[in-house]
Image: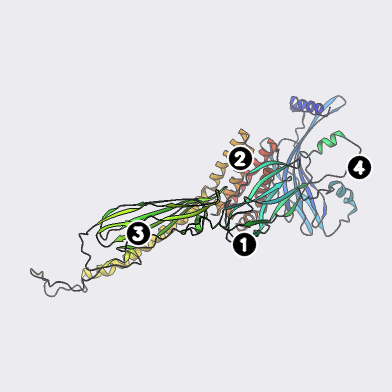
Amino acid sequence: MIKQILILSLLITLAFPGLSNDQVNFTGKAKQVVKVGESFRVIYEVNKEASNFQSPDFKSLQVLSGPSTSSNSSIQYVNGKMTQNYSMSYTYIVQAVKEGDVVINPATVTVDGKNVKSNSIKITVVKGATSQQGNTNQNKSNQPSETGILQDDDVYIRATVSNNSPFIGQQLILTYKIYTKVPVSNLMVKKLSSFQGFWSKSLLEGNNQYQQKTEIISGEEYIVAEINKFAIFPQKTGKLTIEPSEMECNVQLRVQSNRKRGYDPFDDFFNDPFFNRNVKNIVAVLKSNSVTVTVKPLPQLGKPKEFSGAVGDFRLSSRIDRTNLNANDAVTLTYTISGNGNLELINLPEVRFPVDFESFDPKITSNIKTTDTGISGKKTFEYLTIPRNAGDFEIMPVTLSYFNPADNKYHSVSSEKYEIYVSKSDISSNGISYSSSAQEDIRFIGKDIQHIKTPPFKFKPQGEFLFLSNAFFILLILPIISMIIIIIVIKQLGKRKSNVGLMKNRKANKVAKSRLKTAEKYKTSGDDNAYYDEIAQALWGYIADKFSLKQSELSIETVIDLLKEQDVENSISESFINTLNNIEFARFAPGDSRDKMESIYDESVIAIMQAEQALK
């Protein structure tokens, strides 16, 4: 019956759009007297469809959440005459911080292409309970009964490890996941595990976007997201304990108002969480469980004598640039170790060159990849060696031994054997000095005694000297001019390097708008997760480009500090931060409506436009 009434009301509303009042009323209301530390609502209500809502300056009041947008439409019959009422509201949850009078300036919306301003709101903040009798009833009626209490199973962090009984040196994946039934935002690491007895590397470094999914646990639906992931390698045997990690986040709880009336089906309907805007925000500290692993020593049976501690699954390859050359010519020999495991701690076994070869320390390069499955990649050792005498030589294979936990066996892989044919050099090596410290140390000597010059001779006229001649002054000025040119070139190069940040700054708005267009495509296609990810990337990327920072260095606090340093108005800064928080709340709140997605999109566009104007 209730659904039929609501559907009938909606149809009548659509059929008679001209029944609404033509006069635009845009009003703001809030409690007139509050106490320090009290959270309360500030509501702006307009009686027509509106857009481009511009937040007011809340002065010393701290905005906890908002604006939350809702709309209401109703039809009444009075003496056989039908009238329609429509209202659209924007709700903030704010907190009083210090005593005194606070005047909230008017907010602004656009109705039918015209800007409409609300009234100003005056609020008196007092210490302790309010005592004004004229406002007692109003305070009681507006203040919700905050019965919402954060339970242990509402939101928590769980740490899991891929293997609780590994071998020493074996790669393990340690994962931290957050499980939540309530909206959360602004996740920050408060205390990270020290990983004593492990070598560790983060697998999610620089990733601000959390991939989330839904899981049913004990019959209840949770939003689950990986918030941290590490590849860890035990460095000693025995029982090792990974201490708990602590994180801090903002949690949004919904509270219900105390009802002393009888049962009303319409009241139950509009107390549905979709319509109910009575929420409070708290800061929660989440602590994960500790993880204990028992590390086993590597087996001694079948252990090769060349084994040096490599654990994982590896391959060894080699190549040489040439095998036929002349004496005193250089040859490059490259060995590559690739596979899965801790490549950073692996060293190539000693390469034995013939005694007639002069070799240098290898150039080592690493190409390490971190993925959800762990650490993989390759490590390259490049040797430069020079044969000093002619002849036929051999470079024997290099053998790498490793233990593979997948089959609990030792394996050995070898490189190729190289035969090198060195011909006699056409250039005599007499008068050449060699040094094994660096290739550039090769130099010619023995030229300190020159041959006596034989006729014909070229004589200069008597009385012609270089000193004080034109050539003398040219040679004197030439170094100075060269130094000036070098300084100018260095300065120009410095300007070009600095212009990289300038170009990113100038293009920040364009890049953000491009991301917003991409987000709108995701919204049209119904991909909600991709939509919110792109919206968040637009705002975070805008701030990162504007201040030439990496996104991994940003947080809500750093954004506030950066905007404050640029003397950005509080209203613009708060609007930007509120938009970020609203995106995070929507990301973790399942079943969000299309209206909410549209509202978040409009908020994001306004936040970027206001920030762009303030930061020019």
Direction from residue 122 to residue 297 in the image, left or right: left
> Which of the 4 quarters of the picture holds residue 288?
bottom right
Task: Depth check: give the residue in front, 114 or 529.
Answer: 529
Q: What is the C-alpha distance between the residues marked 1 and 4?
A: 58 Å
| CA neighbours of label 4 inside 10 A, class few (<14), some (14 to 19), many (20+) | few
**Badge 1 vs badge 3, beta-carbon distance below 8 Å:** no
Q: Earlier in the sequence, mark 2 or mark 4?
A: 4
Q: Nearer the viewer, mark 1 or mark 4?
A: 1
Q: Is residue 179 above or below residue 449?
A: above
| Mark 2 vs mark 1, CA separation in Å | 38 Å
Closer to the eye: label 4 or 3: 3
Dot 3: within a 10 Å radius of its alpha carbon, few (fewer than 14), some, or many (20 or more) residues?
Answer: some
Q: Which mark is residue 260?
A: 4
Q: Nearer the viewer, residue 164 or 186?
A: 164
Toward the viewer: 561 or 200?
200
Distance (Cα) linking label 1 and label 3 = 39 Å
Residue at image mark 1: 196
Tell which circle, 1 or 3, labels the residue nearer the N-terminal end: 1
> At numbered mark 3, what does the secondary structure look like: helix, strand or loop?
strand
- Secondary structure beneath label 4: loop
SS of the residue at dot 2? helix
What is the residue that sits farthest to the left in this orientation? 456
Which label number is shown at residue 152? none
x and y percentages locating residue 42 in the rendered image: 77, 47
Q: Is disc 2 in contact with disc 3, using a CB cutoff of under 8 Å?
A: no
User: Which amino acid type is shown beneath numbered disc 3?
Assistant: Leu
Provide the residue designation for mark 3.
384
Residue 54, image quadrant: top right
Q: Which residue is mark 2?
A: 530
Q: Is residue 303 left or right of residue 283?
A: left
Query: How many discs mark residues in the rendered view?
Result: 4
User: Measuring 52% from the left and 47% from the top, which residue is drawn there?
Assistant: 507
